[in-house]
Amino acid sequence: MIKASFHGACREVTGSCTLIETDNFKFLVDCGMFQGQTDSKNKNIEKFEFDPKTIDFVLLTHAHVDHCGRLPKLFKEGFKGKIYATRATQDLTEIILLDSIKIQRYEEKNPLYEEKDIEKIVKSFKAFSYYQKIEINPHMSIRMQDAGHILGSSIFEIWLNDEGVEKKIIFSGDLGNPPAPIIKDPDFVKQGDILFIESTYGGRFHESKKEGARIFKKIILDNINRKATLIIPVFAMERSQETLYQLNELIENKLVPKIPIFFDSPLAIAATEIYDKHRNLYDQEAESLIKSGDDIFDFPNLKFTRSRDESMEINNVHGPKIILASSGMCTGGRIPHHLKRNLDNPNNHVLFMSYQAKGTLGRELIEGAQNVIIHDKMVNVNCQITKTGSFSSHSDHNQLINWLNKIKDLKKVFIIHGEDLENKKLADAIDQNIKTTIPEYGETYEF
Protein backbone atom coordinates (compact mmCIF):
# COMPACT_ATOMS: atom_id res chain seq x y z
CA MET A 1 0.00 0.00 0.00
CA ILE A 2 1.21 3.49 -0.90
CA LYS A 3 0.32 6.47 1.30
CA ALA A 4 0.28 10.19 0.57
CA SER A 5 -0.02 13.02 3.08
CA PHE A 6 -0.07 16.74 2.43
CA HIS A 7 2.02 19.25 4.38
CA GLY A 8 1.61 22.38 2.29
CA ALA A 9 -0.03 23.75 -0.89
CA CYS A 10 -3.13 21.92 0.26
CA ARG A 11 -6.24 24.09 -0.26
CA GLU A 12 -3.77 26.95 -0.67
CA VAL A 13 -1.11 27.94 -3.19
CA THR A 14 2.14 28.07 -1.20
CA GLY A 15 4.19 25.70 0.96
CA SER A 16 4.28 22.75 -1.48
CA CYS A 17 5.21 19.57 0.38
CA THR A 18 3.78 16.10 -0.26
CA LEU A 19 4.98 12.99 1.58
CA ILE A 20 4.81 9.61 -0.18
CA GLU A 21 5.31 6.47 1.94
CA THR A 22 5.78 2.87 0.88
CA ASP A 23 6.69 -0.21 2.89
CA ASN A 24 10.34 0.32 1.98
CA PHE A 25 10.99 4.08 1.92
CA LYS A 26 9.62 7.59 2.24
CA PHE A 27 10.16 10.65 0.08
CA LEU A 28 8.94 14.22 -0.35
CA VAL A 29 7.89 16.01 -3.50
CA ASP A 30 8.98 19.61 -2.82
CA CYS A 31 9.51 21.27 0.53
CA GLY A 32 8.42 24.87 0.06
CA MET A 33 7.88 27.94 2.18
CA PHE A 34 4.45 29.30 3.08
CA GLN A 35 3.84 32.86 1.91
CA GLY A 36 1.30 35.62 2.21
CA GLN A 37 -1.29 34.66 4.81
CA THR A 38 -1.04 35.88 8.40
CA ASP A 39 -0.20 32.43 9.76
CA SER A 40 2.46 31.66 7.13
CA LYS A 41 5.29 32.71 9.45
CA ASN A 42 4.07 30.29 12.13
CA LYS A 43 3.70 27.47 9.61
CA ASN A 44 7.29 27.97 8.44
CA ILE A 45 8.60 27.91 12.00
CA GLU A 46 6.61 24.90 13.20
CA LYS A 47 8.20 21.46 13.22
CA PHE A 48 7.31 19.16 10.37
CA GLU A 49 4.45 16.73 11.01
CA PHE A 50 6.82 13.93 9.97
CA ASP A 51 10.34 13.07 11.15
CA PRO A 52 12.85 14.48 8.61
CA LYS A 53 15.36 11.81 9.68
CA THR A 54 13.08 9.15 8.14
CA ILE A 55 12.84 10.83 4.73
CA ASP A 56 15.05 9.05 2.19
CA PHE A 57 15.10 11.69 -0.58
CA VAL A 58 13.31 14.67 -2.11
CA LEU A 59 12.04 15.25 -5.64
CA LEU A 60 12.18 18.99 -6.35
CA THR A 61 9.93 20.16 -9.17
CA HIS A 62 11.44 23.67 -9.47
CA ALA A 63 13.21 26.50 -7.68
CA HIS A 64 10.42 28.87 -6.62
CA VAL A 65 10.65 29.52 -2.88
CA ASP A 66 7.17 28.09 -2.24
CA HIS A 67 8.55 24.77 -3.52
CA CYS A 68 12.13 24.78 -2.17
CA GLY A 69 12.12 27.29 0.72
CA ARG A 70 11.96 24.82 3.63
CA LEU A 71 14.67 22.47 2.34
CA PRO A 72 17.34 23.97 4.65
CA LYS A 73 14.96 23.54 7.60
CA LEU A 74 14.51 19.90 6.55
CA PHE A 75 18.29 19.41 6.77
CA LYS A 76 18.49 21.21 10.12
CA GLU A 77 15.93 18.78 11.52
CA GLY A 78 17.82 15.68 10.46
CA PHE A 79 17.29 14.95 6.75
CA LYS A 80 20.42 13.46 5.16
CA GLY A 81 19.18 12.28 1.75
CA LYS A 82 19.55 13.39 -1.85
CA ILE A 83 17.56 15.97 -3.80
CA TYR A 84 16.66 15.01 -7.37
CA ALA A 85 16.10 17.84 -9.85
CA THR A 86 17.35 19.34 -13.11
CA ARG A 87 20.69 21.17 -13.24
CA ALA A 88 18.95 24.49 -13.84
CA THR A 89 16.79 23.92 -10.75
CA GLN A 90 19.91 23.19 -8.72
CA ASP A 91 21.55 26.44 -9.81
CA LEU A 92 18.43 28.55 -9.24
CA THR A 93 17.65 26.97 -5.86
CA GLU A 94 20.99 28.06 -4.44
CA ILE A 95 20.46 31.75 -5.26
CA ILE A 96 16.78 31.77 -4.23
CA LEU A 97 17.62 30.34 -0.80
CA LEU A 98 20.51 32.74 -0.25
CA ASP A 99 18.19 35.62 -1.11
CA SER A 100 15.54 34.21 1.23
CA ILE A 101 18.00 34.52 4.13
CA LYS A 102 18.50 38.22 3.35
CA ILE A 103 14.75 38.84 3.27
CA GLN A 104 14.21 36.93 6.52
CA ARG A 105 16.97 38.89 8.26
CA TYR A 106 15.42 42.13 7.10
CA GLU A 107 11.86 41.24 8.03
CA GLU A 108 12.18 38.82 10.94
CA LYS A 109 15.75 39.29 12.23
CA ASN A 110 15.99 35.51 12.90
CA PRO A 111 16.04 33.50 9.66
CA LEU A 112 14.91 29.89 9.57
CA TYR A 113 18.38 28.84 8.43
CA GLU A 114 21.89 30.07 7.69
CA GLU A 115 24.29 29.96 4.72
CA LYS A 116 25.93 26.78 6.08
CA ASP A 117 22.58 24.98 5.80
CA ILE A 118 22.34 25.94 2.13
CA GLU A 119 25.83 24.56 1.53
CA LYS A 120 24.54 21.15 2.65
CA ILE A 121 21.69 21.38 0.18
CA VAL A 122 23.91 22.25 -2.78
CA LYS A 123 26.11 19.21 -2.01
CA SER A 124 23.05 16.95 -1.76
CA PHE A 125 21.68 17.54 -5.26
CA LYS A 126 21.68 14.77 -7.83
CA ALA A 127 20.94 16.69 -11.01
CA PHE A 128 19.79 15.05 -14.24
CA SER A 129 18.55 16.07 -17.66
CA TYR A 130 14.98 15.79 -18.86
CA TYR A 131 13.80 12.44 -20.24
CA GLN A 132 16.43 10.30 -18.45
CA LYS A 133 14.81 7.40 -16.64
CA ILE A 134 16.67 6.99 -13.36
CA GLU A 135 16.48 4.08 -10.94
CA ILE A 136 16.35 5.51 -7.42
CA ASN A 137 16.26 2.10 -5.74
CA PRO A 138 15.09 -1.42 -6.66
CA HIS A 139 11.47 -0.38 -6.03
CA MET A 140 11.35 3.00 -7.78
CA SER A 141 12.36 4.83 -10.96
CA ILE A 142 11.74 8.44 -12.01
CA ARG A 143 11.80 10.56 -15.13
CA MET A 144 11.54 14.33 -15.44
CA GLN A 145 9.74 16.08 -18.27
CA ASP A 146 9.61 19.82 -18.97
CA ALA A 147 6.79 21.56 -17.09
CA GLY A 148 7.29 24.81 -19.07
CA HIS A 149 6.80 26.89 -15.91
CA ILE A 150 10.28 28.32 -15.26
CA LEU A 151 13.73 27.28 -16.41
CA GLY A 152 14.37 23.71 -15.29
CA SER A 153 10.85 23.12 -13.93
CA SER A 154 9.79 19.49 -14.00
CA ILE A 155 6.89 17.12 -14.24
CA PHE A 156 7.85 13.97 -12.31
CA GLU A 157 6.88 10.53 -13.59
CA ILE A 158 7.36 7.98 -10.81
CA TRP A 159 7.24 4.22 -11.23
CA LEU A 160 6.67 2.39 -7.92
CA ASN A 161 6.66 -1.37 -7.38
CA ASP A 162 3.96 -1.96 -4.77
CA GLU A 163 3.81 -5.60 -3.63
CA GLY A 164 4.78 -6.79 -7.09
CA VAL A 165 2.38 -4.44 -8.89
CA GLU A 166 3.81 -1.41 -10.72
CA LYS A 167 1.97 1.84 -10.21
CA LYS A 168 2.81 5.01 -12.06
CA ILE A 169 2.41 8.29 -10.19
CA ILE A 170 2.63 11.71 -11.85
CA PHE A 171 3.34 15.03 -10.16
CA SER A 172 2.54 17.89 -12.50
CA GLY A 173 4.59 20.44 -10.54
CA ASP A 174 3.55 23.90 -11.69
CA LEU A 175 2.53 23.75 -15.35
CA GLY A 176 3.39 26.62 -17.70
CA ASN A 177 1.21 28.84 -19.85
CA PRO A 178 2.15 28.19 -23.48
CA PRO A 179 3.29 29.63 -25.74
CA ALA A 180 5.70 31.49 -23.47
CA PRO A 181 8.89 33.26 -24.52
CA ILE A 182 12.28 31.64 -23.86
CA ILE A 183 11.24 28.34 -22.30
CA LYS A 184 9.61 25.42 -24.07
CA ASP A 185 5.95 24.44 -23.80
CA PRO A 186 4.95 21.88 -21.14
CA ASP A 187 5.41 18.26 -22.12
CA PHE A 188 2.43 15.92 -22.12
CA VAL A 189 2.47 12.64 -20.18
CA LYS A 190 0.98 9.72 -22.06
CA GLN A 191 -0.04 7.36 -19.25
CA GLY A 192 -0.34 7.10 -15.49
CA ASP A 193 -2.40 5.70 -12.62
CA ILE A 194 -2.38 8.48 -10.00
CA LEU A 195 -1.96 12.19 -10.69
CA PHE A 196 -1.13 15.05 -8.33
CA ILE A 197 -2.02 18.24 -10.22
CA GLU A 198 -1.70 21.94 -9.43
CA SER A 199 -4.86 24.06 -9.60
CA THR A 200 -3.65 27.65 -9.21
CA TYR A 201 -5.92 28.89 -12.02
CA GLY A 202 -8.67 26.29 -11.80
CA GLY A 203 -11.85 27.91 -13.12
CA ARG A 204 -9.93 30.91 -14.44
CA PHE A 205 -8.99 31.80 -17.99
CA HIS A 206 -6.05 33.86 -19.22
CA GLU A 207 -6.29 36.48 -21.94
CA SER A 208 -4.54 35.44 -25.13
CA LYS A 209 -0.84 36.21 -25.54
CA LYS A 210 -1.76 38.60 -28.34
CA GLU A 211 -4.17 40.49 -26.09
CA GLY A 212 -1.61 40.57 -23.30
CA ALA A 213 1.00 42.07 -25.64
CA ARG A 214 -1.53 44.70 -26.77
CA ILE A 215 -2.32 45.64 -23.16
CA PHE A 216 1.38 45.80 -22.28
CA LYS A 217 2.22 48.08 -25.21
CA LYS A 218 -0.77 50.36 -24.55
CA ILE A 219 0.12 50.78 -20.87
CA ILE A 220 3.71 51.68 -21.74
CA LEU A 221 2.62 54.27 -24.31
CA ASP A 222 0.05 55.76 -21.92
CA ASN A 223 2.71 55.94 -19.23
CA ILE A 224 5.07 57.78 -21.59
CA ASN A 225 2.35 60.29 -22.54
CA ARG A 226 1.73 61.03 -18.86
CA LYS A 227 5.48 61.21 -18.14
CA ALA A 228 4.77 58.89 -15.24
CA THR A 229 6.19 55.82 -13.51
CA LEU A 230 5.14 52.29 -14.49
CA ILE A 231 5.91 49.72 -11.80
CA ILE A 232 5.89 46.01 -12.65
CA PRO A 233 6.27 43.60 -9.70
CA VAL A 234 8.10 40.54 -11.03
CA PHE A 235 9.20 37.16 -9.78
CA ALA A 236 12.95 36.78 -10.06
CA MET A 237 12.60 33.69 -12.22
CA GLU A 238 10.67 33.55 -15.50
CA ARG A 239 8.46 36.62 -15.04
CA SER A 240 11.54 38.88 -14.99
CA GLN A 241 13.15 37.23 -17.99
CA GLU A 242 9.89 37.10 -19.96
CA THR A 243 9.23 40.80 -19.27
CA LEU A 244 12.73 41.74 -20.43
CA TYR A 245 12.12 39.65 -23.55
CA GLN A 246 8.86 41.50 -24.27
CA LEU A 247 10.45 44.90 -23.68
CA ASN A 248 13.37 43.97 -25.91
CA GLU A 249 10.95 43.10 -28.72
CA LEU A 250 9.05 46.38 -28.36
CA ILE A 251 12.15 48.56 -28.22
CA GLU A 252 14.26 46.77 -30.83
CA ASN A 253 11.34 46.95 -33.27
CA LYS A 254 10.71 50.62 -32.37
CA LEU A 255 7.14 49.93 -31.27
CA VAL A 256 7.64 52.09 -28.17
CA PRO A 257 10.08 54.99 -27.59
CA LYS A 258 13.24 54.45 -25.58
CA ILE A 259 12.76 55.47 -21.95
CA PRO A 260 14.70 54.62 -18.78
CA ILE A 261 13.96 51.05 -17.66
CA PHE A 262 15.33 49.82 -14.34
CA PHE A 263 15.78 46.14 -13.56
CA ASP A 264 15.90 46.54 -9.80
CA SER A 265 16.40 43.11 -8.28
CA PRO A 266 19.80 41.57 -7.49
CA LEU A 267 18.15 38.15 -7.31
CA ALA A 268 16.45 38.54 -10.68
CA ILE A 269 19.74 39.72 -12.20
CA ALA A 270 21.49 36.62 -10.82
CA ALA A 271 18.66 34.41 -12.11
CA THR A 272 18.98 35.99 -15.57
CA GLU A 273 22.67 35.07 -15.60
CA ILE A 274 21.70 31.46 -14.81
CA TYR A 275 19.13 31.56 -17.62
CA ASP A 276 21.93 32.61 -19.94
CA LYS A 277 24.00 29.64 -18.75
CA HIS A 278 21.27 27.14 -19.69
CA ARG A 279 20.46 28.22 -23.24
CA ASN A 280 20.05 24.58 -24.22
CA LEU A 281 16.63 24.74 -22.51
CA TYR A 282 15.38 27.68 -24.60
CA ASP A 283 12.65 27.36 -27.20
CA GLN A 284 13.33 27.69 -30.92
CA GLU A 285 12.28 31.35 -31.17
CA ALA A 286 14.69 32.45 -28.43
CA GLU A 287 17.49 30.39 -29.96
CA SER A 288 16.90 32.02 -33.37
CA LEU A 289 17.02 35.53 -31.90
CA ILE A 290 20.28 34.81 -30.12
CA LYS A 291 21.81 33.33 -33.28
CA SER A 292 20.84 36.51 -35.15
CA GLY A 293 22.90 38.55 -32.67
CA ASP A 294 20.07 39.82 -30.47
CA ASP A 295 20.75 39.86 -26.73
CA ILE A 296 17.25 39.00 -25.53
CA PHE A 297 17.94 40.32 -22.01
CA ASP A 298 19.54 43.65 -22.92
CA PHE A 299 18.51 46.69 -24.95
CA PRO A 300 19.03 50.49 -24.99
CA ASN A 301 18.19 52.43 -21.81
CA LEU A 302 17.98 49.31 -19.64
CA LYS A 303 19.88 49.63 -16.37
CA PHE A 304 20.62 46.75 -13.99
CA THR A 305 20.58 48.18 -10.45
CA ARG A 306 22.41 45.80 -8.16
CA SER A 307 23.28 47.97 -5.16
CA ARG A 308 20.97 49.68 -2.71
CA ASP A 309 22.39 53.07 -3.66
CA GLU A 310 21.67 52.44 -7.34
CA SER A 311 18.12 51.46 -6.41
CA MET A 312 17.59 54.66 -4.44
CA GLU A 313 18.92 56.72 -7.36
CA ILE A 314 15.88 55.64 -9.39
CA ASN A 315 13.86 58.11 -7.33
CA ASN A 316 15.87 60.97 -8.83
CA VAL A 317 15.03 60.04 -12.43
CA HIS A 318 12.13 62.21 -13.58
CA GLY A 319 9.87 61.83 -16.56
CA PRO A 320 8.54 58.50 -17.86
CA LYS A 321 10.28 55.39 -16.56
CA ILE A 322 9.62 51.70 -15.97
CA ILE A 323 10.67 49.84 -12.83
CA LEU A 324 10.84 46.04 -12.72
CA ALA A 325 11.41 44.83 -9.18
CA SER A 326 10.74 41.78 -7.04
CA SER A 327 9.08 40.23 -5.23
CA GLY A 328 6.25 39.33 -7.57
CA MET A 329 3.62 39.37 -4.80
CA CYS A 330 5.09 42.55 -3.23
CA THR A 331 5.92 40.70 0.00
CA GLY A 332 9.63 41.56 0.14
CA GLY A 333 12.60 42.72 -1.86
CA ARG A 334 12.69 46.22 -3.34
CA ILE A 335 9.18 46.45 -4.77
CA PRO A 336 7.51 47.64 -1.51
CA HIS A 337 9.87 50.65 -1.43
CA HIS A 338 8.85 51.68 -4.95
CA LEU A 339 5.17 51.16 -4.21
CA LYS A 340 5.36 53.21 -1.01
CA ARG A 341 6.81 56.09 -2.99
CA ASN A 342 4.52 55.91 -6.03
CA LEU A 343 1.08 54.50 -5.14
CA ASP A 344 -0.43 57.83 -4.18
CA ASN A 345 0.25 59.50 -7.55
CA PRO A 346 -2.78 59.15 -9.89
CA ASN A 347 -0.54 59.43 -12.97
CA ASN A 348 1.43 56.31 -12.06
CA HIS A 349 0.52 52.75 -12.96
CA VAL A 350 1.16 49.34 -11.38
CA LEU A 351 0.91 46.36 -13.74
CA PHE A 352 0.51 42.90 -12.19
CA MET A 353 1.49 40.06 -14.48
CA SER A 354 1.59 37.22 -11.93
CA TYR A 355 -0.59 35.36 -9.46
CA GLN A 356 -1.14 37.14 -6.12
CA ALA A 357 -1.73 34.85 -3.14
CA LYS A 358 -4.12 35.56 -0.28
CA GLY A 359 -2.67 37.81 2.39
CA THR A 360 -0.10 39.51 0.14
CA LEU A 361 0.21 43.21 -0.60
CA GLY A 362 -0.23 42.39 -4.28
CA ARG A 363 -3.57 40.68 -3.58
CA GLU A 364 -4.77 43.73 -1.64
CA LEU A 365 -3.92 46.02 -4.55
CA ILE A 366 -5.59 43.96 -7.29
CA GLU A 367 -8.70 43.62 -5.11
CA GLY A 368 -9.05 47.40 -5.01
CA ALA A 369 -7.68 48.46 -1.62
CA GLN A 370 -7.87 52.24 -1.26
CA ASN A 371 -4.98 52.29 1.19
CA VAL A 372 -2.38 49.78 2.29
CA ILE A 373 0.26 49.52 4.99
CA ILE A 374 3.87 49.33 3.76
CA HIS A 375 6.73 49.29 6.27
CA ASP A 376 4.30 50.35 9.05
CA LYS A 377 3.14 53.38 7.06
CA MET A 378 -0.35 53.89 5.65
CA VAL A 379 -0.17 54.65 1.91
CA ASN A 380 -3.10 55.90 -0.18
CA VAL A 381 -3.68 54.04 -3.46
CA ASN A 382 -4.51 56.62 -6.12
CA CYS A 383 -2.57 55.21 -9.07
CA GLN A 384 -3.96 52.90 -11.74
CA ILE A 385 -3.81 49.16 -11.04
CA THR A 386 -4.00 46.63 -13.88
CA LYS A 387 -3.92 42.82 -13.69
CA THR A 388 -3.36 40.66 -16.75
CA GLY A 389 -3.21 36.86 -16.76
CA SER A 390 -1.76 36.39 -20.22
CA PHE A 391 1.80 36.60 -18.89
CA SER A 392 1.16 34.14 -16.08
CA SER A 393 3.60 31.23 -15.89
CA HIS A 394 0.76 28.92 -14.74
CA SER A 395 -1.67 27.04 -16.97
CA ASP A 396 -5.24 28.30 -16.86
CA HIS A 397 -8.30 26.09 -16.41
CA ASN A 398 -8.60 24.90 -20.02
CA GLN A 399 -4.87 24.23 -20.29
CA LEU A 400 -4.90 22.18 -17.07
CA ILE A 401 -7.85 20.06 -18.25
CA ASN A 402 -6.35 19.63 -21.72
CA TRP A 403 -3.06 18.48 -20.17
CA LEU A 404 -4.80 16.08 -17.79
CA ASN A 405 -6.98 14.59 -20.54
CA LYS A 406 -3.90 13.51 -22.48
CA ILE A 407 -3.04 11.01 -19.71
CA LYS A 408 -4.47 7.56 -20.39
CA ASP A 409 -5.56 5.06 -17.70
CA LEU A 410 -5.89 7.61 -14.89
CA LYS A 411 -7.66 6.15 -11.86
CA LYS A 412 -7.18 8.84 -9.23
CA VAL A 413 -6.40 12.57 -9.12
CA PHE A 414 -5.30 14.66 -6.13
CA ILE A 415 -5.85 18.40 -6.63
CA ILE A 416 -3.24 20.54 -4.86
CA HIS A 417 -1.54 23.95 -5.05
CA GLY A 418 -4.73 25.99 -5.31
CA GLU A 419 -7.29 27.81 -3.19
CA ASP A 420 -10.64 26.20 -2.33
CA LEU A 421 -12.71 27.71 -5.15
CA GLU A 422 -10.10 26.92 -7.80
CA ASN A 423 -9.73 23.35 -6.46
CA LYS A 424 -13.47 22.74 -6.72
CA LYS A 425 -13.85 24.21 -10.19
CA LEU A 426 -11.04 22.04 -11.51
CA ALA A 427 -12.45 18.96 -9.77
CA ASP A 428 -15.88 19.56 -11.31
CA ALA A 429 -14.34 19.59 -14.79
CA ILE A 430 -12.54 16.25 -14.45
CA ASP A 431 -14.10 13.09 -15.89
CA GLN A 432 -16.45 11.71 -13.23
CA ASN A 433 -15.12 8.19 -13.84
CA ILE A 434 -11.80 9.29 -12.31
CA LYS A 435 -11.81 9.44 -8.52
CA THR A 436 -10.88 13.02 -7.63
CA THR A 437 -9.81 14.18 -4.17
CA ILE A 438 -9.18 17.65 -2.78
CA PRO A 439 -7.02 16.58 0.17
CA GLU A 440 -7.03 18.03 3.67
CA TYR A 441 -3.88 19.42 5.25
CA GLY A 442 -2.04 16.71 7.23
CA GLU A 443 -4.41 13.92 6.22
CA THR A 444 -3.11 10.58 4.93
CA TYR A 445 -4.62 8.85 1.88
CA GLU A 446 -3.95 5.29 0.71
CA PHE A 447 -3.97 4.03 -2.86
Image (cartoon, rainbow, N blue to C red):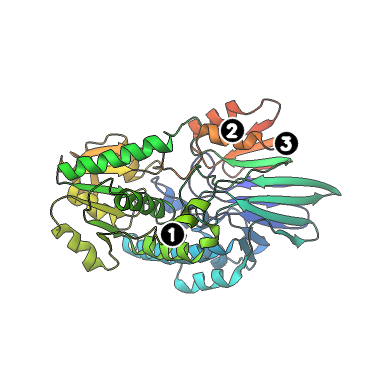
Q: Are marks 1 and 2 in contact (CB under 8 Å)?
A: no
Tell me the residue that label 2 is attached to. 401
Q: Residue at x 18, y 38 (%)?
A: 382
Task: Report the front residue among 207 and 385.
Answer: 207
Q: Residue at x 30, y 43 (%)?
A: 351
Residue 437 in which image quadrant: top right
Q: Amino acid at mark 1?
A: Ser
Give the mark, 1 or 2, whose residue is nearer the N terminus. 1
For numbered disc 3, what is the local secondary structure? loop
Please tell me whether residue 137 is drawn above or below residue 443 in the rendered image: below
Per the model, the C-alpha gap separating discs 1 and 2 is: 37 Å
Q: Amino acid at mark 3?
A: Lys
Give the mark, 3 or 2, whose residue is nearer the N terminus. 2
Indicate the quadrant containing the C terminus: top left, top right, bottom left or bottom right: top right
Tell me the residue that label 1 is attached to. 292
Evaluate whether residue 97 shows in this view: no
Task: Report the front residue among 120 and 237.
Answer: 237
Marker disc for residue 234: none
Q: Is residue 54 left or right of residue 295?
A: right
Please tell me whether residue 50 is drawn above or below residue 174 in the rendered image: below
Tell me the residue that label 3 is attached to. 408
Label 2 crowd (10 A; few <14 / some 14-19 / many >=20): some
Label 1 crowd (10 A; few <14 / some 14-19 / many >=20): few
Q: Is residue 162 left or right of residue 296?
A: right
Q: Are marks 1 and 3 in contact (CB under 8 Å)?
A: no
Q: Residue at x 56, y 66 (%)?
A: 75
